[in-house]
Amino acid sequence: MTVRTTRRVFLSAATMMAAAIAATACGSPQDTANGGGDSAAPVKVGLVYSQSGALASYGKQYIEGFRAGLDFATNGTNKVGDRAIEITEVDDAGDPAKAVSAAKDLIGKGNKIIAGSTASGVALQVAPIAAQNKVLFISGPAATDAVTGANKYTFRSGRQSYQDVVTAKSFIGDPAGKKVVVFAQDGAFGDANEAAVKAVIGGAGASVSAVRAPASATEFTPFASQIKSAKPDLLFVAWAGTTAPAMWQTLDQQGVLTSTTVVTGLDIRASWPTFGAAGSKISFLSHYFDGASDTEAAKAAKAKVPGGTLDLFHPDGFAAAQMVVRAVAEGGDDVEKMVTALEGWSFESVKGSMTIRAEDHALLQPMYQASLTGSGDTFTATAQKALTADETAPPVQAMKG
């Protein structure tokens, strides 16, 4: 288990400008810290996320976003009042067992706030630990719907799967009477996506069926023929892994991409070349990409992240830091007050206006329809439509604990 403890203070000109804007708009955390606790002691925050493993690229974006968000939310001081925010980073490598061990260790060392969770399996194992120990847990890029309403101590700083699927639904308008086909690999990932489409789009009146392929498949012509014969109004593609380029090429060659509306999720920028020539023929649902928003928070994030280009999970880290600062500013060392401070809170973040729904801690936020243009290794994403937080709000879940 790799542990890194960091204390960072950023004082760039861009940060000072962002700080001035933030201070004018809503005051600073230094003015609002009122939750009690040792006014001089650091606030310990544990970040448990994927620094290695399959989701390391997601974790890298998350931590870059978190650092930028902490700088933004504290006006460049990394302090709430006189208290420094002391961050301990732990690599869970996407392994729930490692994440649980790390969370318990951090809690034992006095961390009352745990954030991170790049992987859904990790988030679902850490959430009960937070409830058992009565510490604040802010899940990150993990998209599983089950995090919402998990317990009163669990929140999320990213979107959830329902918000992805309802964005896909927006491409066909009223789904009533429409035919939808889900094309996915066999396995848990495909099962989850098929179930989500049936619940969200099928639940709105569409007829939903699925074409499933073995995860080991390398020849996709039979599946493309099956899809084309079904004549769907919408094809929802959920795919992961190295066979994606061959799969998209086959769908394109067999005329599937021009015979119906094809929707899939827009992943991180590094994955865009895998679409090849098919990319311009696909409709993308998007959580975020550089240029999707032009908020003050987005400008501040771009000024801080390495390379100056935002990607899919930078907003999740940024929002997590804003939530940490809010919790400490209002709650001090009192976790119950932290929870109360976050419930129902609306704030401006990278994507725009966000609201933490009090009933189940869903994070209501904008989502995007997007298109890709380009070729080779150079593609550009463009927002076709921004869906409001109300348009993508998931159903309210009963709080489980």
Image (spheres, grey):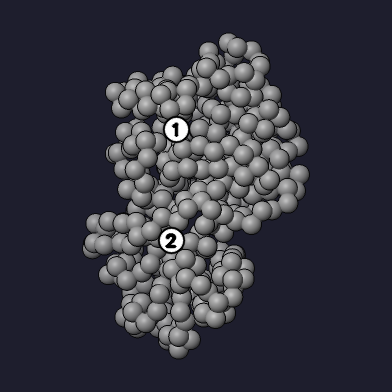
Res. 285 mark:
2
Left or right of 86 on screen, residue 68: left
Left or right of 333 on screen, residue 296: left
Discs 1, 2 touching: Cβ within 8 Å: no
Judge whether residue 130 can be spotted in this image.
Answer: yes
Q: What residue appears at the point 43 percent right and 37 percent down from the top-left corner? A: 65
Left or right of 251 on screen, residue 136: right
* Number of residues whose C-alpha sits closer than 10 Å to that of mark 2, classed few (under 14), some (14–19) or many (20 or more): many
Q: Residue furthest front?
A: 25
Q: Tell me if residue 30 comes above or below residue 191 in the rendering.
A: above
Question: Which image quadrant for residue 205?
Answer: bottom right
- Residue position marked by numbered label 1 in the rendering: 69
Judge whether residue 315 can be spotted in this image.
Answer: no
Q: What residue appears at the point 44 percent right and 43 percent down from the top-left corner? A: 352
Give x and y (percent) for residue 228: 42, 85
* Three-letter amino acid code at the position of disc 2: Leu
Q: Nearer the viewer, residue 216 or 204?
A: 204
* Three-letter amino acid code at the position of disc 1: Gly
Q: Nearer the viewer, residue 291 or 43?
A: 291
Give x and y (percent) for residue 359: 68, 45
**Does dot 1 land on a helix, a strand or a loop?**
helix
Q: Nearer the viewer, residue 319 or 84?
A: 319
Q: What residue appears at the point 61 percent right and 48 percent down from the top-left corner? A: 362
**Does dot 2 land on a helix, a strand or a loop?**
strand
Give x and y (percent) for residue 224: 42, 82
